[in-house]
Amino acid sequence: MGAYLIWHALQWLGYVRRRLNSDPGFYAPKAAVLCPCKGVEPGLERNLVSLTEFERQNYEIFFILASGSDPARSIIERVAKNSRVKAHVVVAGPPSNCSEKVNNLRVAIEQLPPEFEVLAFADSDGRPGKSWLHHLVAPLGDVRIGAATTMRWFIPNRSDLATALLAAWNAPVVTMMSEKGKNFCWGGGTAIRRSTFEQSGVLDEWKNSVSDDYSLTRALARNNRPIVFLPECLTLSYVETDFDGLMEFTNRQILITRVYADKVWAPAAATHFLYCLTLVFGTLLVFGDLLAQRPAFHLLTLTFLPLLLSAIRGSIRLIGVTEALPSARSQITGQAWIYVLVTAFIPFLYLVNFANSLVTRRIRWRGVTYELISPEQTRVD
């Protein structure tokens, strides 16, 4: 298994390099950049300003709030006023049977004028580069493609343990995406033709959903539309959290995966369980041999081989990410220990998340509690 994961990481790195050396082409239709927002978070204004700085693309921005009294509104209106491209502020109102984010997107899309050919989804905690939108939209020139997507990369804003664990927890998700695998849409960086969006019935899929991206993925899969992963569009996200925030975020992600993508959740849970079991059981056997003064080198080697292979995989991943994000290379390599060493122990945190997803269907997301009854049914508390 470890050797296969190393081989998979090398395949992934090769794909990253091929994408970085490819020309995106000239397809640049008018796009609507849709960014749901809620609350003031670190770096919010700089993140939103980055959405106004895209090059080589005809687009307008739609910042969407659930409430007109949201604390972020003054920042959003300032960014919209100073934007060099046309920016709108949309107040969607409260949701009923879906998440605030999904409701925000539904309301904004239903109000869009017909001249927008492409929908591009962004998150308020991301900070994409200037070529991000053009590279994200360009592959849609091939009408066979369902959607183009990318993934976030967390950079800790501070050096506490909880923030480091969050960045390490997120890192492996990047290599889940590939050239030929069953990719999924990420809500913070996905572009889709409006015609494909409508033909796939995404608005209907969203009606009672908490997850914008998994529901979009399900709608595309039902219509046999492929999702292309674009590593050249990896999106920086500067994060800081405490342990409560860490557990809220990670538990939420895994529970959503269990409800909306159980075929991903089950093998992932089994893999992480076996990894953790190997380390724990092996460590106990090694200490037993040491206490009995028996040779333990062979057990030590077998026990910690998965850690070594995980670190190698993390290093390969880090090479690809720094090549895709050259402007942040020094920041990323300066915290390489998080992405290489800490990540090797992150399966234990994942195991806690998987266990939590077995005993509850409730998540908390930006101050709102949701009960995920099924992919088609959500209860807002």
Image (cartoon, rainbow, N blue to C red):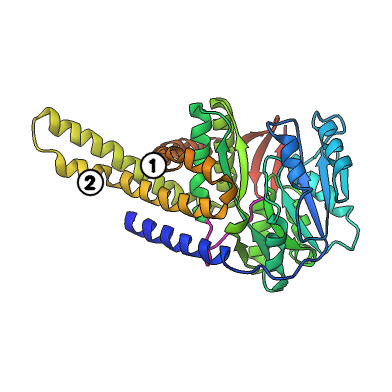
Question: What segment is highlighted magenta in the picture?
Answer: 177-187
Image disc number at residue 133? none
User: Mark 2 = which residue?
Assistant: 302
- The three-letter code of the residue at mark 1 reads Ala
Residue 139's image quarter? bottom right
User: Mark 1 = which residue?
Assistant: 344
Label 2 vs label 1, nearer the camera: 1
Q: Quadrant of the N terminus?
A: bottom left
Query: Nearer the N terminus, badge 2 or badge 1?
Result: 2
Tag 2 and tag 1, C-beta contact below 8 Å: no
Residue at the image position 68 percent from the left and 61 percent from the top: 135
Badge 1 marks a residue whose secondary structure is helix
Residue 249, position in %: x, y?
A: 59, 35
Task: Give the vertical position of 171 relative to 77 (above or below).
Answer: below
Dominant secondary structure (helix, strand or loop) of the stretch shown in magenta: loop
- The three-letter code of the residue at mark 2 reads Leu
Residue at the image position 62 percent from the left and 41 percent from the top: 237
